[in-house]
Each structure stands twice: as C-alpha cells, then as structure tokens.
Amino acid sequence: MHRQSDDRTDRADQRSDLPVLPSHNTARSALTCRYRCGDACSHEAPNRSLNPYFGDIVQRALSRRGVLKTATVVALATGAGTATAAATSSAPVSGTGMRPPRGLDFEPVAPNTADAVTVPDGFAQQVVIRWGDPILAGAPRFDARKQSAKAQAKQFGYNADYMALLDAPHRGHQLLVVNHEYTSEQIMFYGYDPANPTREQVEIAWAAHGLTVLVVRGDGHSGKLWPVTGDALNRRITATTPFRLTGPAAGSDLLKTSADPTGRTVLGTLNNCGGGTTPWGTVLSGEENFNQYFAGAAAVTDPAAKTRLARYGLPQGASERKWELYDSRFDIGKEPNEPNRHGWVVEIDPYDPTSTPRKRTALGRFKHEAAEPRLTADGRVALYMGDDERFDYLYKYVSKHAYKTGDSRAAREHNLTLLDEGTLYVAKFTGDSPATEIDGTGKLPADAEFDGTGEWIPLASGDVSHVPGLSAAEVYVFTRLAADKVGATKMDRPEDVEPHPYTGRVYVALTNNKDRGATGKAGPDEANPRTGNKHGHILELEERRSDAAAKTFQWKLMLVCGDPEDPSTYFAGFDKSQVSPISCPDNVAFDEYGNLWIATDGAALGYHDGLFAVPVKGSQRGHVKQFLTMPKGAECCGPIIIEDRILVAPQHPGETDGATAEHPGSAWPDGPGSIPRPSVVTVWREKHR
C-alpha cells in the first residue's frame, strides 16, 4: 500500500492502469513545452557544429579501475544531498530476498497517474509553502482572482526548482532557498489572452520569477516545516532585482546596453533551474532557458551576431510571453546585447538580505542546469555544469585560488572572489569499444559496459583565451561557440551534475534526446548510445586520482533508463526484474549514506514523474526504487535528502494540454474547485508504522 494525500486529507490508494505510451519525446504537455523552454524540442537544435566523436577511432579496450582511492578527495556536503530520509532495516526488500542498503528501507511506490503526491506506506507528507503564500511582512493572502504584481513581489514565487536548506541563526530554524524557474501564464491568470497579456499580468510574472529566501521552523517531532512569514532574513529576488556582473567578461562591450553603458549591472534573473551551495554559505543558481524571453532576433543583420543568436536559440519573432511589449530590453532589435546578460550562474548570499546578487561570468554563458561544487586536493573550488540542450556539453570550472576556512571577514571576502578567476573547461568523451559495437539500439558492447576515458579541454583562464580566433570575453559570453571550436562531445541534454559526497565521483543526468541519430544529426556514440533517446541515462565520471583538478577522467554509464523489460535499458548490471521503471532523469542528490536520488522530468513511459533512489556501490548497485510520484502535469524538482525529511517541489501541476485557470488540469494541492499551485512538500517517516 502507498499513501497519496495533500496536506489536509489522506486519499485512497490508487494504482492506475498505465496508458498507452506517448508517441512524442516525453510525457510533457505542449503547454509545458511552450512555457518552460520556449518549445525548444520542436525547433532545430542550436548546435549545428560538425564535432567528431573521438570514440569512433579508438579500437582498444582501456584498463578498468578498481576501488576508488579517496584519501585526497575533499568533497562538499551540500544542502541538496547530504543525508537520508529513511532508517536502516533488517527486513529484506520485498521480492528480492535482500536487505535494503542503509537509507533505502521503503517499499517502492507503484507507477501511477494519480493527481497527488504518492509516498510509500509508513511515510507522511505536508505542503510547506505554495505559490502566492506570504513571505515578506505586509504580504496579502493569496487570491488568484485578485493577484497583483505588488502582492507577488512579497509572496512565494512560481514553479520552484532547485532548493537548498541551510542553518539559520535562529535556534530551531532553517533557511530554505528556492529557485523559481518560470511562469505558466495560461493556468495562472483568469481571462488570460496569450496574444495580448496585460501589463499587470506581465509584471506579476516578473515578480514570480527568481528566487525566494525563507526562514522555516520545525516542531522537533516530525518532518513538518512551517514558513516564518516576515522574518528579517526572508527575501524575494525577481526579474527586476539589480544584479552585479563580475569576473573577466564584466564591462565587456558585449554586455553593454543603453540602460547600462558600463556592462556591469543587470536587472533580474530568468529561468533559474539547477544550482548548488558553496562551502562559504552562498547559493548558486543557474539561468537556463533564458532565450525564450526575448524577441526580434530577425532585426539583427550582422552575420556574426546572427550566428551567435542562432547558437543560443533566440526567437526570430515575438516571444511567448510578449514581455517586449512592456520593456524594450526584451526586444533584441532595440537592445541586441541584453540576451548576453542572461544565461549565467548567479550567486546570492541568503544571510544578507541587503546584498547585491552576482552573475559570475568566469563560469561561462549557456543554459545552466547545475553548479554543484567540490574541492580539489589542494583546496581550490571545482564546479560542474551541464548545458541543457540537445547535443550540448558538460563543463567544469576550477578556481585559481584555494578556499579559506573559517568565519573571519577576510576569509569570507576572499572566498567571494573564487568564482571570478579560474579556468573554464569543456568535456570530450572517448569510448573504449569499436564504433561498430555502438549501433544505437542500446545493446551493450562486447566488454559489457558503456565506458571509456575523457579529457577536460581548457577554454579560458582569466583574461587568456585558449580558443584560437576568440578573445577571452567572447569565450565567456559565447561559450557554446568556443566549445564547438575545440571539438567537445555532443551530449543528450546534460542537466544536473552532482559530485558524490565521499568518493568524489561525479554523476551526470542526461535527460533525453529525440534527435540522436536522426538524419543530418550526430549518431550514437558510447557516451550517448541510443538513437531517438526518449528516456535518458546517468553517467558516472571518475577523475584521475579522484582529484577535481584533474584534466583527464574515466567514465561509464551507470543507468540507461526506460522500461526494465526494454532490452535497451541497463541498471549497472542489477537484475532488471527487480527495479522500478525510470525515464528522463533530471535532478540528482545524495543522502548521507551515498545513495543517489533521482528526480525525473517528462517521463515517457505513460505515468507521472517522481523521485527514485539507487545505491551506487555494493551488491545492489543499480537497484532503482521509486520513492514518490507527482500530481497530474507536474515534474519532480528539488530534491533535498536529509536525515529527518525529504523535500521535493512539484513543479507546474496541472500544466496539461487545454488547461486554463478556468479549466484547471489538476486539483493539487488544495482540492477540487481550486487553481493548481506549484509548492514545496516535505516527506518523513512516521514513528509508528
């Protein structure tokens, strides 16, 4: 039995018969595709470079490594994945005859299509905060029919994604930091006309983007959390908040506009997706599908500028949301450099609500999905970053200077400069199997693994470019073009990237790529072995000597996702009859035992997205188990896995084809007759089972 409930009542258990598999790339609705990423998959992939896949010329098998040597690894324990939500049990896993690994003692939730968050038997849940709930002092209660921009600027934003949970100065309290990725105007606003949004609707959307910093408190007896409305640390950062550009590209002519002739101050942050937490207590947030907010690329006639705009997928005509009607900075014809000021990793200080957030240009500009750090053997900071686009790349940044421990002002000021000076790299993967053995079906090569070696290719270090023909500023602002030039490996939508908290191995979620192997597109390779890849895979990367500063690595695919009965799937060699089906991995996190937790987005198997857990070592490596499922139309975001609770963010509930505010596609979380509201949910094990 599994429990489905909102925060008010338990619902009867529902195990739905699975519908016919969808014919498109994922289970995302067309509405989600419009608002989340500007319908990116319906357009030509921006990467039209002719990079070769170097595994095609490698015919020798590489030696395998054994157990990792971890003595020199200094890994970060982050708010997104440092502990577990479940206790150890001596009971065997149902159907396997094996005891569950530490932290994974739960019965898997069955795939379903219920309009609820479904959790395992023995677990409880609570909605912590919803879109529109008050955050700042003076914020009104949410009223969907009377919403205003002034109210939204003081309320919890829309569509939560990355989350971090940090210690707060107040005893018994914590700081919850949440990204707000995008807005879904058609299901937010009554009477919404997509062709003619009102100024008020547009300004509400601006205020619903960005981030929230929120103090929360628990009761000490359960996993429940409550927002502390009006706390002095609470903050909303929106699409109109001033940001400071820092690092080697700041002040470049490529970043100057009529409103900012210095190229150093930007209004707002857009489409904030994955992120990370630094050891000095700041939060990083990646700007992802920023391109969709701009309009009018057709007005640009300079050939070089047109190439740059096309490589980033900037729309030729009007934007989906029509923001250009009310602010000329979203009109490329009027402000051709404004798009260059978005697509960065931003850094905020959640402990100082008066601080100016920064956009870190040394980390490169692309559709950032992740920015999770670990320390190198000599104490410098390494950041791993995915570019969430079909056929785009995996990146790494290594700081020039080392992290300083301690809480002194001097140490903090030093650490706040670490993301401004270092080297930016892009990954090139080489398979160790003959190209003839990678036929696109997902069939394992003769050595029984998809694996090989790779290298980090330097793009720029400070003011020095390593890419012929491009200045350092051009490398940072047009990072995709720089990576094209050096022959990086085209990947199947690299999204979240997380270092293991103990081993230092790095895990990459590659969500899907329907165009892999299509006519005129890159074919399968050992790192992306399936044509028409609907279900995605998880890549495991081990750097030389387990040092994050290494320039070479070994890699293997840990999971090749999909229906376990599909012969193209692979679960690290584990018995596929015992695993939960999983499709379209997106966000990943770790618990305190080192188990990998995977949140999915757009599962293409006919049931709802969810959260999954899998051991990465031992006899049950690859044993995927589903922990929870999402409401109708929602993807699973977050997640945070800590000792006494798991937090997830059901994003865009009710975002189904044909849905509007008048005719909602979901009744979650408030029940029938309500408008669906993206929220944060906490889940915990009940003490009496």
Image (cartoon, rainbow, N blue to C red):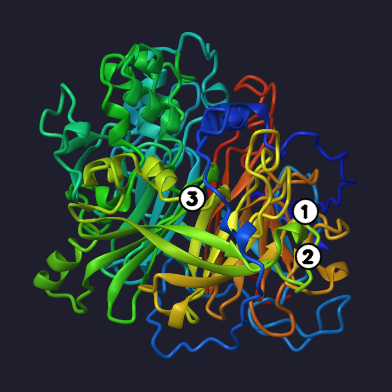
Q: CA distance from mark 2 to mark 1?
A: 9 Å
Q: Earlier in the sequence, mark 2 or mark 1?
A: 1
Above or below: residue 223 compared with residue 345? below
Which secondary structure lies at badge 3? loop
Mark 3 is on which residue type?
Tyr
Q: CA distance from mark 3 to mark 1?
A: 22 Å
Residue at the (73%, 51%) spot, across then down: 530
Q: Quadrant of residue 240?
A: top left
Name the residue beneath numbered marker 1.
Answer: 439
Q: Quadrant of residue 242?
A: top left
Above or below: residue 556 compared with residue 520? below
Mark 2 is on which residue type?
Leu
Q: Nearer the viewer, residue 550 or 281?
A: 550
Above or below: residue 546 compared with residue 611? below
User: Label 2: how many residues lie within 10 Å, few (<14), some (14-19) or many (20+)?
Assistant: some
Left or right, 333 with respect to 32, comes to left
Q: Position of residue 496 (x, y in %)?
A: 51, 56
Name the residue beneath numbered marker 3.
Answer: 393
Q: Position of residue 524 (x, y in %)?
A: 68, 50
